[in-house]
Image (cartoon, grey):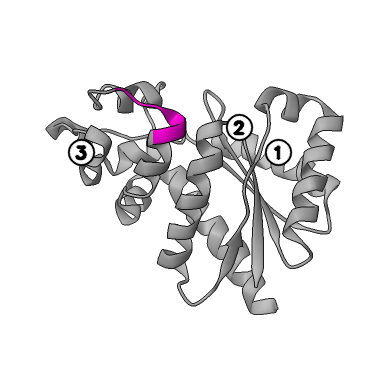
C-alpha cells in the first residue's frame, strides 16, 4: 500500500481533494489501493517564500506518507505559468525531501477550472446550471474560475461545502480531455501512485 500526503492552500481543497483523488484512484487504477491522507493546509505565499515554512511542511508531509508514499503539492496557478512555476517548486521541494517522491500540480488558473472543463456534467449538482456556450469555453481562460462557477449556482458557491460536492460529481474524462492542468494531475497520479505500488 502506498499513501499520498497533499499540501494545499484552501479550506475547500482540504475537503475536496481527497474526494477527487479517491475518484481518480478508481478511474486510473482501481486495482491499486492508495491511502489518501488528509491534506495539509498552508498559506501559499508564506509556504513558497519562507524557507523555514517550506521545509517544515514538506518534512511533515514526508513523515505522514511514509517511505513508500509520495507528496503532492496542489495550488492554483493564478497568473503564473503552471509549467514554469511548477518546475521551480518541484526542484525546491526535491532538495528538501530527496527521500520522497514529489509531484507539483498547479491548476490553471484555479481548481474550479476543472469544473468548467466538465460543466455540462455538473447540471443539477448543488443547483449548478451550465449554459450552451459553456461547452465551447476554454476552461483555463477565465481568470476568476470561482466566480464563473458561482454565476451558475443560484444559491452561490461556497468552497468548503460546494467544492467537495462538485469534485464528487464532475466528469473526469471530460476534464481530462479539455484541461491540460487536469491531465497533469492524472499523469502525476499514474507516475507516482501506480508506480510506487508496483515497487512495494
Kindly identify which residue carries mark 1: 89
The image shows residue 1 at horizontal and vertical percentages of 65, 73
- Residue bounds of the magenta highlight: 156-161
Is residue 157 visible in the rendered structure shown here? yes
The image shows residue 10 at horizontal and vertical percentages of 56, 31
In the rendered view, tell whether residue 71 sits above or below residue 83: below
The image shows residue 58 at horizontal and vertical percentages of 78, 44
Kindly identify which residue carries mark 2: 9
Kindly identify which residue carries mark 3: 135
Instruction: Tell me if label 2 and label 1 are in contact, CB under 8 Å.
Output: no
The image shows residue 96 at horizontal and vertical percentages of 84, 45
Name which of mark 2 and mark 3 comes first in the sequence: 2
- Which quadrant of the view contains residue 188? bottom right
Name which of mark 1 and mark 3 comes first in the sequence: 1
Q: Nearer the viewer, mark 2 or mark 1?
A: 2
- Which quadrant of the view contains residue 118? top left
Please tell me whether mark 1 sits on a helix, a strand or a loop: helix
Please tell me whether mark 3 sits on a helix, a strand or a loop: helix
> Does the stretch in magenta take in 157?
yes
Q: Nearer the viewer, mark 2 or mark 3?
A: 2
Left or right of 170: which side holds 73? right
Is residue 112 visible in the rendered structure shown here? no
Q: Which mark is residue 62?
A: none
> Does the stretch in magenta take in 117?
no
The image quadrant where one finds the C terminus is bottom right
What's the distance in space between the residues labelled 2 and 1, CA to CA? 14 Å
Amino acid at each position: 500500500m502506498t499513501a499520498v500526503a497533499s499540501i494545499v492552500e484552501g479550506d475547500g481543497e482540504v475537503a475536496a481533494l481527497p474526494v477527487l483523488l479517491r475518484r481518480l484512484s478508481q478511474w486510473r487504477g482501481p486495482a491499486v489501493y492508495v491511502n489518501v491522507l488528509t491534506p495539509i493546509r498552508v498559506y501559499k505565499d508564506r509556504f513558497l517564500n519562507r524557507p523555514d515554512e517550506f521545509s517544515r511542511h514538506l518534512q511533515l508531509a514526508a513523515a505522514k506518507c511514509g517511505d513508500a508514499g509520495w507528496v503532492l503539492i496542489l495550488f492554483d496557478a493564478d497568473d503564473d505559468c503552471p509549467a514554469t512555476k511548477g518546475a521551480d517548486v518541484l526542484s525546491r521541494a526535491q532538495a528538501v525531501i530527496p527521500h520522497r517522491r514529489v509531484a507539483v500540480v498547479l491548476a490553471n488558473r484555479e481548481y474550479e477550472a476543472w469544473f468548467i472543463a466538465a460543466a455540462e456534467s455538473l447540471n443539477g449538482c448543488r443547483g449548478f446550471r451550465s449554459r450552451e456556450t459553456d461547452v465551447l469555453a476554454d476552461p483555463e481562460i477565465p481568470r476568476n474560475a470561482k466566480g464563473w462557477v458561482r454565476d451558475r449556482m443560484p444559491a452561490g458557491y461556497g468552497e468548503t461545502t460546494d467544492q467537495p460536492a462538485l469534485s464528487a460529481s464532475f466528469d473526469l474524462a471530460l476534464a481530462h480531455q479539455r484541461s491540460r492542468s487536469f491531465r497533469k494531475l492524472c499523469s502525476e497520479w499514474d507516475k507516482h501512485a501506480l508506480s510506487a505500488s508496483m515497487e512495494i
